[in-house]
Amino acid sequence: MKIATYNVNGINARLPVLLKWLSTSAPDIVCLQELKAPQEKFPEAAIAEAGYQSVWHGQKSWNGVAILTRNMAVHELAVSLPGDPEDAQSRYIQTEINGVLIGCLYLPNGNPAPGTKFDYKLRWLERFKAYTDTLLKLDKPVVLTGDFNIIPDEVDVYKPERWLEDALFRPEVRSAFRSLTEQGWIDAIRKLYPNETIYTFWDYFRGSFSRNAGLRIDHFLLSPHLESRLTAAGVDKYVRAWEKTSDHAPVWIELKDE
DNA sequence: ATGACCGGGTTACCCGGA
């Protein structure tokens, strides 16, 4: 079972690129972030024509998340992260497929830091940590994937010294990410590639992609059950080189059957 | 150190993104 995550930066602007990537990469499950489209503007029919069922939670202008599946029934379980009914931002959607709970998240960016946006990011991380505690106690296979907006370590950014004050790299958020892996969640890319420089995002400007000035901010966290089932992982970096592409590249893992 | 590139939409001398 191949599971992918892709911050599309606008589902409608990205539709041709998304469909082309789906046909070449052929993931079974896809988590999308930054739809930047209200609920009724999601291109469900075009995606269905490509062979994928969708569940999504849109929002006008910003945010928005979706889960697509190929040849598998989708049962939508949740469209928000528990813990704050007042939070109106569409940043989490969750479903269960083939006995695996799939959480698709778009964590707040948090810049500028410090400030109210950074405070929101930290609150979101607290809620997320409380929820991951709950998920671990379920004692079942769980995949949490998406755009975490967290650079976990110095190896995950081209010039760490320039990012020290940034909301993606500040000690509070790196510590929050570390607390998840210490809790038992497996960073799938790092599990398979402990020392390699691997990026998932490159700015549109400053010639970032051609200079490979990137960040690793899109992640897969696996519950301990899935460690023995993880067989492969990677970044579809070639998609970032396409015309009209997102500033993120798709990231994927392969899980073998039990 | 700085700029500049995208998508959405109030089509702007706008905003947010990372």
Image: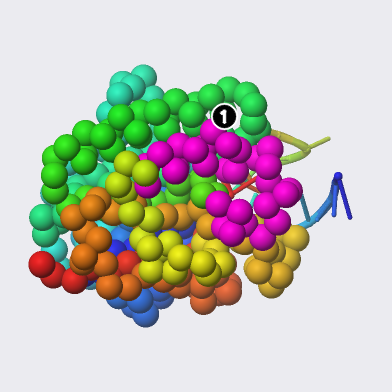
Task: Please name whichever residue, A44 or A131, is drawn nearer the observer in this view of the structure.
Answer: A131
Badge 1 is on which residue? A118
Task: Please name whichever residue, B7 or A194, is drawn nearer the observer in this view of the structure.
Answer: A194
Does A199 sit left or right of A218 as displayed? right
Residue at horizontal 31 percent and vertical 61 percent from the top: A30
**x, y percentage for residue A57?**
31, 42
Image-quadrant location for residue A205: bottom right
Q: Is residue A181 visible?
A: yes
Numbered disc 1: secondary structure: helix
Mark 1 belongs to chain: A
| Up-down relation of residue A116 to residue A53 (above or below) | above
**x, y percentage for residue A50?**
28, 71
- Position of the N terminus of chain A by quadrant: bottom left
Q: Residues within 10 Å of mark 1 (few under 14, many from 20)?
A: many
Return the residue found at the far front. A182
Q: Is residue A176 magenta?
A: yes
Task: Please name whichever residue, A15 or A211, is drawn nearer the observer in this view of the structure.
Answer: A211
Q: Is residue A228 magenta?
A: no
Q: What amino acid type should be assigned to the residue bearing mark 1?
A: Phe
Q: How many marks?
A: 1
Image-quadrant location for residue A253: bottom left
**x, y percentage for residue A117?**
56, 28
Return the residue found at the far top. A86
Q: Is residue A52 visible?
A: no
Residue at horizontal 52 percent and vertical 62 percent from the top: A200
Does A206 sit left or right of A199 as displayed? right
| Up-down relation of residue A196 to residue A177 (above or below) | below
Instruction: Magenta stretch: give its range.
Output: A153-181
Residue at horizontal 35 percent and vertical 33 percent from the top: A129
- Position of the C terminus of chain A by quadrant: bottom left
